[in-house]
Amino acid sequence: MTLHPIVERASHGELPVWAVASEDRRRHMERVADLLGTWAAALGLDEDARGRWLAVGYLHDALRDAPVEELRARVPPTLAALPGRILHGPAAAERLRVEGVADGELLLTVAYHTLGHPALGTLGRALYAADFLEPGRDLLNDWRAGLRDRMPGALEAVVREVLGARIAHLVDRRSAMRSETVGFWNALSERT
């Protein structure tokens, strides 16, 4: 598989010219990409596959710091009602699609890295975990370090644990859950 030039450059840490990400956000993206690169190597993935894993580490938050109004205007109508804090994934995926990236798995992964989605494959599940587990986050550090240590060998179990914690947080806050998140949980539960 030949990587699209944007994906190829992102695999080397170069963001698209349209990215809107602060220095702190870029450091987060680098840590996520480092985790994904390490996991891809441990899984013995070929060079192109490792490049895709590294690229999503950088591309998932490429529009994280863009104004919400701009993001809402860039997403498909079916996602325009999403809360502002999670519009960046679908907006980045749509921008990548418009730029000619035709890698459906990569686009789905970027679009749903915050919500989860029942159709996420190994790449999407790995990003979902890496985004939560990257070592720069200061939250439940011992638990998260333990989960990182189990990766990538226990990917399914770790993703299920991360998603379960996120769902519990939503329940504790009495927040609504998106159907994509519920579907992701159901898809993971069916694999046990």
Image (tube, rainbow, N blue to C red):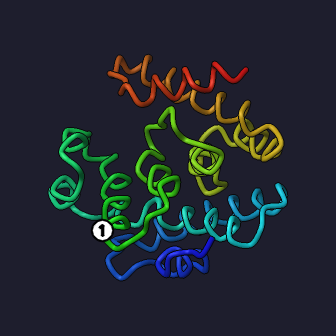
Which x, y percent locates residue 44? 84, 60
What amino acid is at disc 1? Val
Query: Which type of secondary structure does the marked residue at label 1 adopt?
Result: helix
For label 1, the residue is: 98
Q: Is residue 100 above or below residue 17?
A: above
- Looking at the image, residue 77 sits to the left or right of residue 179; the answer is left
- Foreground pick, 170 / 124: 124
- Looking at the image, residue 94 sits to the left or right of residue 148; the answer is left
Which x, y percent locates residue 156? 71, 34
In which image quadrant can residue 159 be found? top right
Q: Local crowd at mark 1 within 10 Å, few (<14), some, or many (≥20)? A: few
- Looking at the image, residue 149 sits to the left or right of residue 184; the answer is right
Which x, y percent locates residue 17? 35, 82
Q: Residue at x 60, y 43 (%)?
A: 121
- Looking at the image, residue 109 sits to the left or right of residue 76; the answer is right
Q: Residue at x 33, y 55 (%)?
A: 88
**On-image quarter of the C terminus:** top right
**On-image quarter of the N terminus:** bottom right
Q: Residue at x 47, y 55 (%)?
A: 104
In which image quadrant can residue 185 be found? top right
Which x, y percent locates residue 41? 81, 63
Q: Residue at x 35, y 64 (%)?
A: 97
